[in-house]
Amino acid sequence: MAQESVLDRATYKKIKSMSREEMQKFLTNYYYNVMEDAETSAVDLEALRAELSSIKGFGEKRLDEIMSVIEKRVVISNVKES
């Protein structure tokens, strides 16, 4: 399986010529862009629970067990909306 290139040549050349301050600003902006993307792809646990409860054979007890496992594995963001 071929590895997909994440960094194009132009961006690589730009990064190589950056000063420490420019690199810090670049990485900070990159971090915030990634965080924005991650926040928009959050899982709605209530909707997930409702959809799982509609599956035949899932009782309330089993649903609680499944949701507790999901909640342990999903990162819950406590970011307040502005």
Image (cartoon, rainbow, N blue to C red):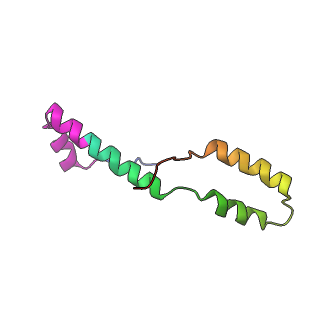
* Quadrant where the image shows the C terminus: bottom left
Q: Establish if 58 lies above or below 75.
A: below
Residue 73 percent coordinates (x, y): 63, 43
Q: Residue at x 23, y 36 (%)?
A: 24
Residue 24 visible:
yes
- The residue lying furthest to the top in this view is 20
* Res. 4 visible in picture: no
As for residue 29 lying within the magenta part, the answer is no
Decide if residue 24 is on the left or right side of residue 33.
Answer: left
Q: Which residues are magenta?
A: 7-26
Residue 23's image quarter?
A: top left
Q: Residue at 71% x, 66% y: name it.
A: 51
Our reading of the magenta stretch's main secondary structure is helix
Give the left or right position of residue 80, taking residue 71 as reference: left
Q: Residue at position x 86%, y 58% from top?
A: 59
| 31 displayed left or right of 67 | left
Image coordinates of residue 62 in percent, x first then y, are: 83, 52
Q: Residue at x 56, y 46 (%)?
A: 76
Q: Position of residue 53 (x, y in %)?
A: 77, 63
